[in-house]
């Protein structure tokens, strides 16, 4: 049987139907049936094809006859009249309101049915006119929070995650750099600095025939609309909605333009004032002496050297410590993409992962890793099919068997154990101490005060069995702000207890943030870069974690998992008492 929609899309539509039913003011049981069904599909290990082919779909707990039919229709035809009709009842811009934090379908329905509010702009105006606070169930505080939420939705919508920008940029860069009229080409801007989110793709090239390059760029198949076109610059919007600029300069200007358009703006400001201390003028075209004489620079390195600075890698150019480092010949030597010897915090099919132990291990081996730490969820994470003590013990047997047979990597036993509301852990201490490592993570009860959340995390990191906290601040980039927590205090507690800090490489998380890492390193804390992978492809996300470490200014020595297996295991033991 050929399915038009994959499981993921079916789940998404079921969830959307649940929201639409809430918006329509239907009986809450109805919408809960759809969100339950979505959950069930999400957590079952079996593929949608298998479920349908074996006739098990309708038998599955939480999926009745009516739902079975709808799921079948969706999967096979790609559409569902019931869903389309529901959707058609509301203006499409109304769904933007649901992206505002803490504004659920019920409140959106009130806004729509009592005031006819259909869009973010209309809601913003109503808030500014102080109309919203008068609605029942709202109030002055809610009104204020909605205004802040609208701001956030707009910022989120204006940016994309690094991997999305990277894969959109790759073909553009290849086309430009391989064009016969191109002398040199580079990515610039936030993408070259490896920022976690990106507004637009900045490209730079040098050429003797800029017009030809501009023509070729605007004519690329990925380009949807041309928003600006001159003789040396073009701005476009790509099919996927991301904007991109190409600038073309003369080849002797290339290093200066590269430096300027890589930024950041803050770094540029510091570079210009550094130039002024020598009586020079620096801009995007040249470095000039007071008498107008031009200092030629063949490449970017030469610009830094002309200003008596060490070369500064793009990742560090955020206007923080880098100029001071470069003046003192103290630019750190950063961890490189190939430096990891293994990784921890990966999931398998035992909880909410998609691959088996063996498949994950084989994929880790293919990346050149020597060890792979499995950290499936614990029982409190029931929605992720978390393991109880018995299933954990079974997994350990499986791991022992694997390690005895000898595969490409050594598998380390671990757990991603839920941190409960009060900071207690979901497994007893002796179980955690039997693991090779344990990740403590918050997956529920986010709405605590900063003091409570900080205490909760400190309590967890003080537990002898814990190696590090998973995704310490809980943020989801462009989706969810971090929970309120005093990161400095948690880092202090981590240092005091000889524990590590995770750099979670999942591109939605990149948590701990690079801005907070240096302070932790200076307190002597070690880091571990982990993909939090839920399938074999996810292991490769570690490159984004390495970007974070590089932006933080971390070298190989600060990262525990740059060590060979034996040294790494020694370090792991040091996180434990005794
Ligand atoms: P983004 O696009 O928000 O992800 O971040 P960037 O850094 O790519 O920013 P963008 O695209 O606006 O500009 C690219 C670079 O051009 C920026 O990193 C530094 C330089 N630049 C842009 N505007 C200014 C400015 O007003 N002053 C200075 N000094 N540099 C600027
Ligand atoms: Ca940019
Ligand atoms: Zn996790």
Image: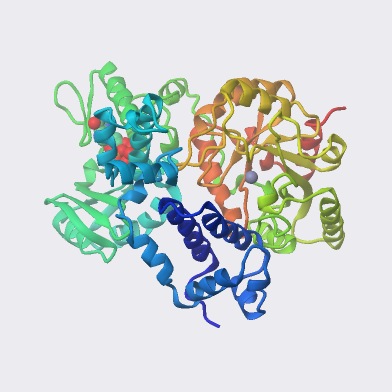
Q: Quadrant of residue 213?
A: bottom left
- Percent coordinates x, y for residue 43 in the rendering: 65, 59
Number of disc labels: 0
Residue at image point 53% right, 62% down: 11
Q: Return the residue nearer the eye: 288 or 285.
A: 285
Q: How is the image coloured?
A: rainbow
Q: Determine whether 203 is above or below 143 in the image.
A: below
433 on left or right of 259: right
- Percent coordinates x, y for residue 303 in the rendering: 32, 32
Q: Quadrant of the N terminus?
A: bottom right
Q: Determine whether 456 is above or below 335 in the image.
A: above
- Percent coordinates x, y for residue 37 in the rendering: 59, 61
202 on left or right of 361: left
Q: Return the residue nearer the eye: 199 or 118.
A: 118
Q: Return the residue nearer the eye: 236 or 350.
A: 350
- Percent coordinates x, y for residue 468 in the rendering: 70, 34
**Extreme residue toward the bottom, this view:** 1
147 on left or right of 62: left
Residue at image point 26% right, 29% down: 128
Residue at image point 28% right, 27% down: 130
**Extreme residue toward the left, this view:** 231
Residue 265 shows up from this direction: yes
Q: Quadrant of residue 320?
A: top left
Report ligand 3 position as a quadrant.
top right
108 on left or right of 459: left
Q: Quadrant of the C terminus?
A: top right
Q: Determine whether 90 is above or below 438 in the image.
A: below
Residue 262 shows up from this direction: no
**Extreme residue toward the top, this view:** 277
């Amino acid at each position: 049987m050929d399915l038009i929609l994959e499981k993921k899309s079916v789940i998404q539509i079921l969830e959307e139907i649940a929201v639409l039913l809430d918006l329509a003011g239907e009986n809450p049981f109805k919408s809960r049936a759809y969100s339950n069904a979505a959950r069930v599909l999400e957590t079952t290990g079996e593929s949608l094809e298998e479920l349908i082919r074996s006739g098990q779909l309708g038998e599955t707990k939480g999926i009745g006859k009516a739902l079975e039919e709808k799921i079948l229709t969706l999967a096979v035809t790609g559409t569902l009249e019931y869903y389309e009709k529901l959707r058609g009842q509301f203006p499409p811009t109304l769904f933007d309101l649901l992206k505002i934090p803490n504004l659920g379908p019920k409140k959106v329905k009130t806004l729509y049915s009592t005031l006819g509010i259909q869009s973010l702009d209309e809601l913003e105006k109503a808030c500014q006119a102080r109309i919203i606070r008068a609605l029942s169930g709202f109030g002055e505080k809610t009104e204020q929070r909605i205004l802040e939420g609208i701001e956030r939705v707009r910022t989120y919508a204006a940016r994309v995650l690094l991997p999305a920008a990277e894969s959109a940029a790759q073909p553009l860069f290849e086309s430009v750099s391989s064009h016969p009229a191109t002398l040199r080409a580079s990515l610039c801007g936030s993408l070259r600095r490896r920022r976690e989110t990106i507004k637009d793709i900045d490209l730079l090239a040098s050429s003797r025939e800029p017009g030809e390059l501009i023509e070729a760029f605007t004519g690329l198949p990925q380009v949807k609309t041309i928003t600006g076109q001159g003789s040396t610059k073009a701005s476009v919007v790509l099919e996927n909605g991301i904007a991109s600029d190409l600038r073309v300069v003369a080849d002797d200007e290339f290093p200066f333009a590269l430096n300027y358009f890589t930024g950041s703006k803050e770094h540029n400001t510091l570079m210009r004032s550094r130039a002024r201390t020598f009586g020079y003028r620096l801009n995007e075209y040249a470095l000039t002496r007071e008498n107008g004489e031009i200092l030629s620079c063949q490449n970017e390195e030469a610009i830094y050297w002309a200003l008596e600075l060490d070369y500064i890698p793009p990742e560090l150019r955020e206007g923080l410590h880098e100029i001071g480092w470069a003046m003192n010949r103290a630019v750190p030597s950063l961890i490189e993409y190939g430096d990891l010897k293994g990784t921890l915090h990966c999931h398998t099919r035992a909880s909410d992962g998609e691959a088996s132990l063996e498949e994950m291990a084989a994929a880790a081996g293919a990346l050149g890793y020597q060890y792979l730490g499995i950290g499936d969820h614990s029982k409190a994470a029931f929605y992720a099919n978390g393991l109880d003590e018995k299933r954990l013990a079974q997994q350990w047997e499986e791991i022992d068997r694997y390690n005895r047979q000898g595969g490409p990597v050594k598998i380390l036993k671990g757990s991603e154990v839920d941190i409960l509301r009060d900071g207690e852990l979901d497994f007893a201490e002796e179980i955690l101490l039997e693991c090779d490592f344990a990740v403590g993570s918050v997956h529920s009860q986010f709405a605590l005060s900063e003091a409570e959340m900080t205490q909760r995390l400190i309590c967890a990191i003080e537990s002898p069995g814990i190696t590090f906290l998973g995704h310490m601040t809980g943020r989801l980039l462009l989706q969810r702000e971090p929970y309120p927590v005093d990161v400095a205090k948690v880092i202090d507690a981590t240092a005091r207890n000889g524990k590590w800090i995770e750099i979670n490489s999942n591109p939605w998380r990149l948590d701990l943030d690079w801005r907070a890492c240096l302070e932790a390193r200076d307190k002597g804390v070690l880091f571990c870069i982990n993909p939090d992978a839920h399938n074999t492809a996810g292991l490769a996300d570690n490159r984004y974690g390495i970007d974070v470490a590089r932006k933080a200014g971390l070298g190989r020595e600060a990262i525990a998992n740059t060590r060979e297996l034996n040294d790494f295991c020694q370090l792991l033991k040091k996180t434990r008492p005794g």
